[in-house]
Amino acid sequence: MSDIREDVDVRLLVLVRDMSPEQAEEVLAFAERIAAQSRGRERALEGVKATFGIWRDRQDMQGDSVELVRSMRQEWEEREERLGLA
């Protein structure tokens, strides 16, 4: 894996050295944006993993999950009807 990484590093360096300073700045800005997006996805995934299953021990969430969701949706629909939003 490190051989592949070194090859990519060398190829990028050669390409950037042949660019104008403006082009090199554009490549750098693009690379920084991609890195930031990747970090954002990693943080989001960490957040999902940290909260996954957080309600599993709640007493009001025991039983058939499909039926629980149907019941919640029915409550929401009834509320919307009462408020004239449906």
Image: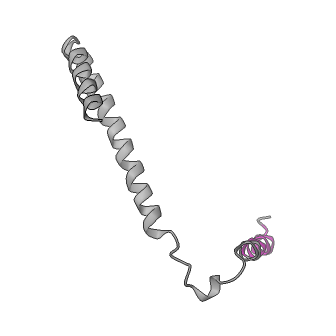
Give left or right: position of 5 versus 68.
left
- Farthest-out residue, bottom: 59
Q: Quadrant of residue 65?
A: bottom right
The residue nearer to you, when weighing 74 against 38, is 38
Residue at image position (63%, 86%) is 60
Answer above or below: position of 78 versus 32: below
In screen coordinates, is 27 left or right of 59? Answer: left
> Quadrant of residue 25 in the image?
top left
Above-or-below relation of 84 to 11: below
* Quadrant in which residue 33 is drawn: top left
Q: Residue 12 vs residue 45: left or right?
A: left
Q: In front here: 17 or 86?
A: 17
Q: Is 58 or 72 nearer to us in this picture? A: 58
Q: Quadrant of the N terminus?
A: top left
The secondary structure that dominates the magenta segment is helix
The reply to whether the magenta stretch includes residue 18 is no
Q: Indicate whether 56 appears above or below 21.
A: below
Q: Residue at x 29, y 24 (%)?
A: 27
Q: Is residue 76 magenta?
A: yes
Per the rendered image, the range of residues in magenta is 72-84
Q: Position of residue 26 (x, y in %)?
A: 29, 23
Residue 34 lies left or right of residue 65; in this view the side is left
The residue sitting at 26% across, 21% down in the picture is 12
Which residue shows up at 21% across the image and 20% down it?
13
> Residue 78 location in percent, x, y?
79, 75
Q: How many marks?
A: 0
Residue 53, percent from left and from top: 53, 73
Q: Nearer the viewer, residue 41 or 78?
A: 41
